[in-house]
Amino acid sequence: MGKKINVVAVGTFDVIHLGHINYLKQAKALGDKLIVVVSSDAQCKKRGKEPYFSERERKQMVEELNVVDEVIVGHQEDIFKVINELKPSIICIGHDSHISEEVINENLENGNKPKIVRAKALHTDKYNTTKIKKNYL
């Protein structure tokens, strides 16, 4: 039996919608185990986002998704700390993630060079957390 392929997906997951489900299904298809890192409240605020739900609530919502094997809240100050601890085989980032593959590689510790895959978007902008929050919350 070969080495298990662990995949890490990262996001805020503030208001879960079909875009998130699509992203996580794509991530899960890349390996054996899907670990989701939910952005901490501190990291959200640092990026200028004010989550509607707390990190504890967002973690709990993601844990309810069948496609996910494990959920971790990200580090308060360093978004790469958890990824460096997990040392995944693959990192799957959302289609609309503002972080580039180059920035990820620059911030990973030596010897921790997972494959980085950007998920494909659904063909609609209906599933956009910012728009949902603006229009409904």
Image (cartoon, rainbow, N blue to C red):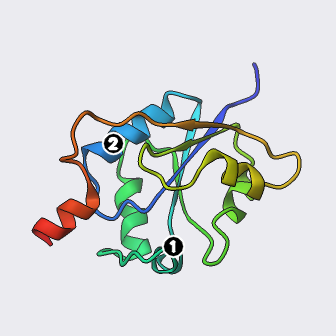
Which amino acid does the dot numbered 2 rest on?
Ile
Q: CA distance from mark 1 to mark 2?
A: 20 Å
Of residues 31 and 113, the one drawn nearer to the viewer in this rendering: 113
Which amino acid does the dot numbered 1 rest on?
Ser
User: How many marks are shown on the rendered structure?
Assistant: 2
Q: Which residue is mark 1?
A: 40
- Drawn side of residue 77 relative to residue 108, left or right: left
| Residue 105 pos. (x, y %) | 74, 49
Dot 1 alpha-carbon crowd within 10 angstroms: few under 14, some 14 to 19, many 20 or more? many
| Residue extending furthest toward the right | 110
Identified at 39% across, 55% down, the residue is: 62
Of residues 112 and 31, the one drawn nearer to the viewer in this rendering: 112
* Label 1: element kind: loop
* Label 2: element kind: helix
| Residue 56 pos. (x, y %) | 43, 73
Residue 124's disc is none
> Do labels 1 and 2 touch, CB within 8 Å?
no
Instruction: Answer above or below: position of 3 versus 87.
Output: above
The tag earlier along the polypeptide, 1 or 2, is 2
Identified at 75% across, 58% down, the residue is: 107
